[in-house]
Amino acid sequence: MDDEAFNISIRKFLKVVGVSSQREIEQAVAKALQDGSIQGDETLPATMTLEIAGLKLRVAFDGEVKLQ
């Protein structure tokens, strides 16, 4: 295994996940504000699940998204 290539690959994957996730959350919040289903002062529980089937890895990360 090439540790450097492995590390770079992980970092690229996490960058895509981070940027894409942020965009999705921002769009969902904007839509929910527009349709009135949230007020804009909530703290929303969130879960992110990482799964790599080939490694039989499935890990959930819990947190929250604060709107104010």
Image (cartoon, rainbow, N blue to C red):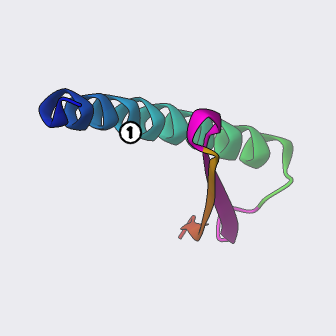
Locate the N terminus and report the quarter of the image it occupies.
top left
Residue under the image location 59 percent in, 33 percent down: 54
What residue do we see at 56% from left, 69% from top?
Answer: 66
Q: Is residue 55 left or right of residue 6?
A: right
Residue in front for this viewpoint, 47 or 40: 47
Q: How many marks?
A: 1
Question: Relative to 16, is 44 above or below?
Answer: below
In this view, which residue lies farthest toward the left?
Answer: 4
Q: Residues within 10 Å of mark 1 (few under 14, many from 20)?
A: few
Viewer-proximal residue, 50 or 15?
50
Q: Which residue is mark 1?
A: 14
Relative to 39, say whether 6 is above or below.
Answer: above
Where 22 sits versus 42, above or below? above
Rendering quarter of residue 64: bottom right
Which segment did they paint magenta?
Answer: 39-55
Instruction: In the rendered view, tell whether residue 67 sits above or below residue 30.
Output: below
x and y, in percent, of residue 51 in the image: 62, 43
In the image, 30 versus 56, the foreground residue is 56
Looking at numbered disc 1 in the image, what kind of residue is underneath it? Leu
In reply to whether residue 4 is colored magenta, the answer given is no
Question: In the figure, residue 25 lies in which quadrant?
Answer: top right
Tell me the SS state at disc 1: helix
Residue 68 horizontal/vertical position (percent): 53, 70
In reply to whether residue 42 is colored magenta, the answer given is yes
Tell me where residue 32 appears, x and y as whole percent: 77, 46
Q: Position of residue 47 (x, y in %)?
A: 67, 60
Q: Which residue is at the far front? A: 1
Q: Nearer the viewer, residue 58 or 49?
A: 58
Q: Is residue 54 left or right of residue 4?
A: right
Q: Is residue 21 left or right of residue 15?
A: right
Q: Residue at x 64, y 46 (%)?
A: 56
